[in-house]
Amino acid sequence: MPPDRGGGALFSLKFTVFAVGTVCLPLCGFIFCVIWSLIFNFEETTATHCRVPNYLPSISAAIGGVTPQRYVWRFCIGLHSAPRLLVAVAYLNFYQGGGGSFWRIRINFLLNVFEVLCLLLLTFISSNENHDIHKLAFVFFMFFSLGYMSLTIRIWRVLRKYSVSAEERRSYAWKKRLFFFNLTTFLISVMFYCRHTIYCEHG
């Protein structure tokens, strides 16, 4: 029988399950790409421009250098991105009802959207296909990502002045931890990348 148009929802899904599934898509895709590269494409994915091989495949080489890794990664990111945009809209509505700054919330939303778009760009244009665009997309992806995470923490700091649940307080604490972890690992990666590119050291 056709559903009652005036009835309740036909389908319900907990946000935590939705969030975990969305996060696991790129994680599982990345793990597959690295393991497959180690087993079947080790030499191709560890080679460098200065003929000093890496110990492990670089991220760009593992996810976009060869197939089938490139197809798996693009599939996972494609499925991952649409829910990310829906979550961005959901957070926009949530923040607007929490008493935060109007412009800060709008800028935060745009940073989130641009982060997802840059992720799609650097995913579907690999470094082998167009190195300059891929590199530029990655730079903007990190800029928007760190900017979004930083501004999110600022917004949550304001929201803490109002009544928030214990779960929301835990979410705020995890956001701070993940921001500093992301920033630290990014700076370390930049340092090693510059050192490798400039000096091409062995060992």
Image (tube, grey):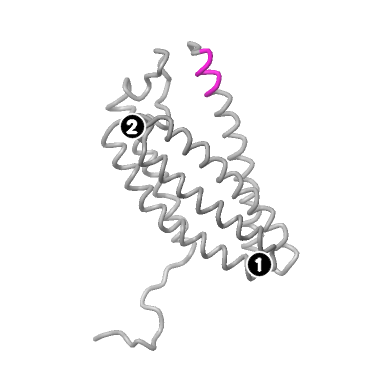
Dividing the picture into quarters, in which one does residue 102 lie? bottom right
Give the label, 2 or 1, closer to the camera: 2
Q: Which residue position is annotated with label 1? A: 165
Question: Which residue is depicted at the point 34% across and 44% down?
Answer: 74
What secondary structure is the stretch in magenta mostly built from?
helix
Q: Say above or below: 98 vs 149.
A: below
Residue at mark 2 to residue at mark 1: CA–CA distance: 48 Å
Under circle 2, the secondary element is: loop
Q: Is residue 197 magenta?
A: yes
Q: Residue furthest left?
A: 1
Q: Which residues fall within the magenta stretch?
A: 193-199
Q: Residue furthest right?
A: 161
Q: Give the percent coordinates (x, y) of residue 165.
A: 66, 67
Q: Which residue position is annotated with label 2? A: 129
Crowding around mark 1 (Cα neighbors within 10 Å: few <14, some 14 to 19, many 20+) is few
Closer to the chain start, of discs 2 and 1, is 2
Under circle 1, the secondary element is: loop
